[in-house]
Amino acid sequence: MRLVLATANPDKAAEIVAILDGVELLPRPPGVSDVAETGETLEANARLKAVALVDATGEPAVADDTGLEVVALGGAPGVRSSRYAGPEASYADNCEKLVRELAAADDRRARFRTVALVRFPDGREVAAEGAVEGTIARRPRGDAGFGYDRLFVPDEGDGRTFGEMTAAEKHALSHRGRAFRALAARLTSP
Ligand code: IMP
């Protein structure tokens, strides 16, 4: 199967290529403009991104959308994770804001959730979700990964943040690993 990868984020693209072993992924063609993530759910945003690439290329496209849901913040930043500290926020800005907001919090539970979605030119869709439960560290640890990885300690790990793990260790546990493995299983099941 051949799918156009809708993400323009090189960090996410590298992870999806590593996880979706066996699927031929075409890079997002240059010149396709960024899609405004105006949806109120992860699934709606994944669909917006995939539809834009189907419209631009006429090929099936795969997209994902991810949110970090922090219990003490009522599920925020959630669908707004990329712009938590403002519309142009960097990964560092978002992490600093999260550390500040949780400075006095004893309840540090959080969950990463990803929706991965394939859209075909005839309008058919296959979607899957993946999640990982964990806690938010008091300060960033590690040099690997991206986004909030240096703050997220998965419950099923050994106390390290995703930022302290190898890529393979992260994918084995992560929201994105789970979502894309489930998606691949659905795409290949009769
Ligand atoms: P997106 O809307 O799917 O691009 O993801 C929203 C934001 O969540 C990104 O800008 C990152 O800050 C964060 N994010 C997404 N995936 C991950 C991950 O695997 N680890 C850490 N942060 C992530």
Image: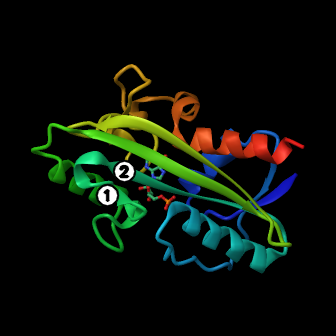
* Spatial separation of the CA atoms under disc 2 and disc 1: 5 Å
Query: How many marks are shown on the rendered structure?
Result: 2
Q: Nearer the viewer, residue 30 or 25?
A: 25
Label 2: few (<14), some or many (≥20) within 10 Å? many
Q: Residue at x 80, y 72 (%)?
A: 123
Look at label 1 and name its amino acid. Answer: Ala
Dot 2 falls on a residue whose secondary structure is strand
**Residue 11 on image: x %, y %:** 54, 52
The answer to which quarter of the image holds residue 49 is bottom right
- Using the rendered image of the protein, determine whether residue 77 is visible from the camera's viewpoint: yes
Q: Nearer the viewer, residue 55 or 190?
A: 190
Look at label 2 and name its amino acid. Answer: Glu
**Residue 13 on image: x %, y %:** 62, 53
Q: Can you say whether 33 is above or below 29 in the image?
A: below
Q: Can you say whether 79 is above or below 159 in the image?
A: below
Residue 33 badge: none
The answer to which quarter of the image holds residue 5 is bottom right
Q: Can you say whether 102 is above or below 37 in the image?
A: above
Quadrant of the drawing holding the C terminus? top right
Question: Is mark 2 in CB contact (under 8 Å) with mark 1?
Answer: yes
In terms of sequence position, does the residue under pointer 2 or pointer 1 come before the other?
2
Residue under label 2, please give it: 69
Label 1: few (<14), some or many (≥20) within 10 Å? some
**Residue 150 on image: x %, y %:** 35, 40
Dot 1 falls on a residue whose secondary structure is loop
Residue 76 badge: 1
The residue furthest left is: 104
Q: Residue at x 77, y 45 (%)?
A: 186
Q: Residue at x 46, y 42 (%)?
A: 145
Determine whether, in the image, residue 167 is placed left or right of residue 86. right
